[in-house]
Amino acid sequence: MEYEVINLREESINGFMPTLSTYIIDDCLGSYLYRKFPAIIVCPGGGYGFCSKREAEIIALQFTAAGYHAFVLDYAVAPDNCYPEPQKNLSDAISLVRRNAEDWRVDADKIAVIGFSAGGHLAASLATMWNKEPLKTTDGLNKPNAAILSYPVISSAKGVAHEVSFDNLCGDDKDLRAKLSLETQVDSDTPPCFIWHTYADATVPVENSLRFASALNNAKIPFEMHIFPDGPHGLSVSNHITANEVNRNVPEVRIWLELAVKWLNRTFNYGD
């Protein structure tokens, strides 16, 4: 595996340098059978206040084991950086992977994003707004081909919103909060999505995922969604390794990862 931490900017912004950590699968077949693999970029959660390590490298390693080059984004967060810096970081990351597709043996038409909680909002932001200002690029290299949203922050609606995430991302700007209520941003250019959540999530209500799924359905965007009855917010892979609290080890939820990989394989026509 090729591991490297790459700066996404030449200079830091407000003292912060966004980075992309690479988990590139070795060319195990040998150069005479030069092979490209699909890729996935991981966006950890953290309420736009930090990037959770529980939803970073361990997620990347699950996907490299499934045959995907993986990348972990360490993106800008509050209080020093807010919208649109995190979104620009992800946009830059996808563009970087596409520009290096030949050297990194990436199938440039099969690049997905996966996000958790606020990282899910970040992934969904680019999925819905990759071709809108201020994220739009002249070459379109920043478009994700698929998105996996794990207990995502989506809506800024009262009683549904994860207020901490929107406070960190938008401050007191009500118009910006409305814009970044992402169920309103889904359109025909949004890529296929996989969504999972738990009904018992008391931090980011399941209504966030339901609203996004409804918007995808209205826009006729293919999606797969799984709602598990039990389990709190922030489950990550939902086992003893990532369970920093006892109730975050929920065996019946672990299948989300297998389901997500199978969905992504079908979406990309990849694997068995």
Image (cartoon, rainbow, N blue to C red):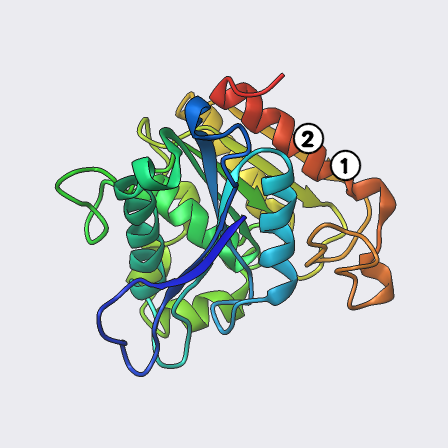
Q: Does 163 appear above or below 157? A: below
Which amino acid lies under the numbered mark 2 shown in the image of this protein?
Answer: Leu
Quarter of the image with the C terminus is: top right
**Is disc 1 in contact with disc 2, using a CB cutoff of under 8 Å?**
yes
Question: Which residue is tagged 2?
Answer: 259
Residue 157 or residue 124, whichever sits in front:
124
Can the viewer see residue 204 in this picture?
Answer: no
Can the viewer see residue 263 in this picture?
Answer: yes
Instruction: Please tell me which residue is depicted at 53% across the width and 28% down the height of the picture.
Output: 29
Q: Does 172 appear above or below 95? A: below
- Left or right placement of residue 243 versus residue 42 in this view: right
The local crowd at label 2, few if under 14, some if 14 to 19, many if 20 or more residues have their Cα within 10 Å, is some
Q: Position of residue 176 (x, y in %)?
A: 31, 61
Question: Which residue is tagged 1?
Answer: 255
Q: Which residue sits furthest left?
A: 138
Dot 1: what SS?
A: helix
Tell me the quarter of the picture where residue 178 sits. bottom left
Mark 1 vs mark 2, CA separation in Å? 6 Å
Instruction: Please tell me which residue is depicted at 45% across the width and 22% down the height of the picture.
Output: 33
Tell me the quarter of the picture where residue 78 sits. bottom left
Q: Position of residue 261 (x, y in %)?
A: 62, 31
Label ID, residue 142? none
Q: Position of residue 194 (x, y in %)?
A: 56, 33
Q: Position of residue 86 (x, y in %)?
A: 36, 62
Residue 241 or residue 116, whichever sits in front:
241
Q: Does 260 appear above or below 93? A: above
Q: Does 158 appear above or below 80? A: above
The local crowd at label 1, few if under 14, some if 14 to 19, many if 20 or more residues have their Cα within 10 Å, is few
Dot 2: what SS?
A: helix
Instruction: Please tell me which residue is depicted at 34% across the width and 45% down the height of the picture.
Output: 97
